[in-house]
Amino acid sequence: MPHNHVFGVHRDISRDEWLNIHNRSAPEYRQGEWVREALLGVGRLRRKLFQQATGNVLDVACGYGSNFAYLPNVAHITATDFSPVMLEMAQQRAQKLGIHVDLREGDAEALPFADAHFDTVISALATCSLFNPITALQEMKRVCKPDGRILLLEHGRSKWRWLASYQDRTAAGMVDDGGCRWNQETSDLVRQAGLTIVSDERSLLGIFRAMVVLPSSGNG
Ligand SMILES: C[S@@+](CC[C@H](N)C(=O)[O-])C[C@H]1O[C@@H](n2cnc3c(N)ncnc32)[C@H](O)[C@@H]1O
């Protein structure tokens, strides 16, 4: 049985179960859109970060397409997710926005794209949901052009100790209910994957991180 390492907690969980959790929680995730995007301000964070996306863009673990409305400067959007339920909703979102998005069912840990294919790789609220986030980050690096950018909007362990300790205490339940490791240390994962963080802006009690990342290690 593959392991999913929740930070400070341990879970034995299969990939099929992980996919089931995401398929099952997809409608509820979309229902939370107003609270997440408007009330918590995640929409504003998407707008600010993803306006930097240019050229041929890949959206990894796109969910129901929350990022699609925030890509004003791009030539082409490809989006991928492993959940057919999410992809169906993403198709509806693209239609509603009147934009064309190439949607592809695929595993973020084995992206179905050639090396150095995209100018910008974006991903939002996703590394916390990926089975092996480091493998997925390495895949983002592989498919991004060497002079391209990876833009990550993530959430993880708060910098406030009281909140971080609450996140640690409730981490196991968050994994079981929504497939989310909400106490992960995202910047550590990005560095472990061999990527270089250019900027890392925290917001909302230090939970949300808007990161601009280069697909190269600091050593070039
Ligand atoms: C919390 S949702 C975020 C969706 C979207 N990016 C957003 O910002 O709203 C996490 C997404 O990761 C997807 N996911 C989880 N593991 C995956 C994997 N191994 N490959 C591709 N997608 C995956 C889930 O299906 C889900 O759509």
Image: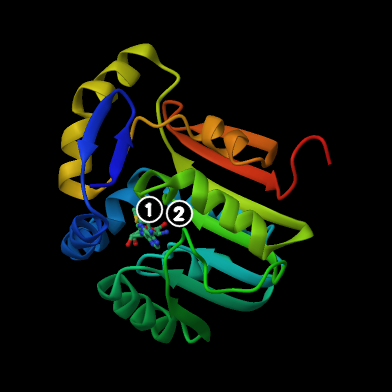
Q: Is residue 50 left or right of residue 33?
A: right
Among the 4 quarters of the image, the one containing residue 213: top right
CA separation, marks 2 and 1?
4 Å
The answer to whether residue 218 is above or below residue 115 is above
Q: Position of residue 198 (x, y in %)?
A: 72, 38
The way the protein has been coloured in the rendering is rainbow
Q: Quadrant of residue 55?
A: bottom right
Residue depicted at 50% across the width and 44% down the height: 134
Q: Determine the image quadrant of residue 195.
A: top right
Residue farthest toward the top in the current orientation of the protein: 161
Q: Position of residue 57 (x, y in %)?
A: 63, 70
**Would you say the beta carbon of the disc 2 residue lies within 8 angstroms of ligand 1?**
no
Residue at image location 58% in from the left, 76% down from the top: 77
Left or right: residue 198 versus residue 22 is right
Element class at badge 1? helix
Quickly name the residue at label 2: 43
Determine whether 133 is above or below 149 in the image.
above
Q: Is residue 17 visible?
A: yes
Q: Residue at x 58, y 39 (%)?
A: 190
In the rendered view of the protein, which quadrant contains the C terminus? top right
| Position of residue 171 measured from the top left corner of the image (x, y, whole percent) | 24, 31
The label on residue 37 is 1
Tag 2 secondary structure: helix
**Who comes first in sequence, dot 2 or dot 1?**
1
The amino acid beneath tag 1 is: Glu
Residue 112 rendering spot, x and y as whole percentages: 52, 73
Give whichever of 22, 143 is nearer the camera: 143
Q: Are marks 2 and 1 in contact (CB under 8 Å)?
A: yes
Amino acid at the residue labelled 2 = Gly
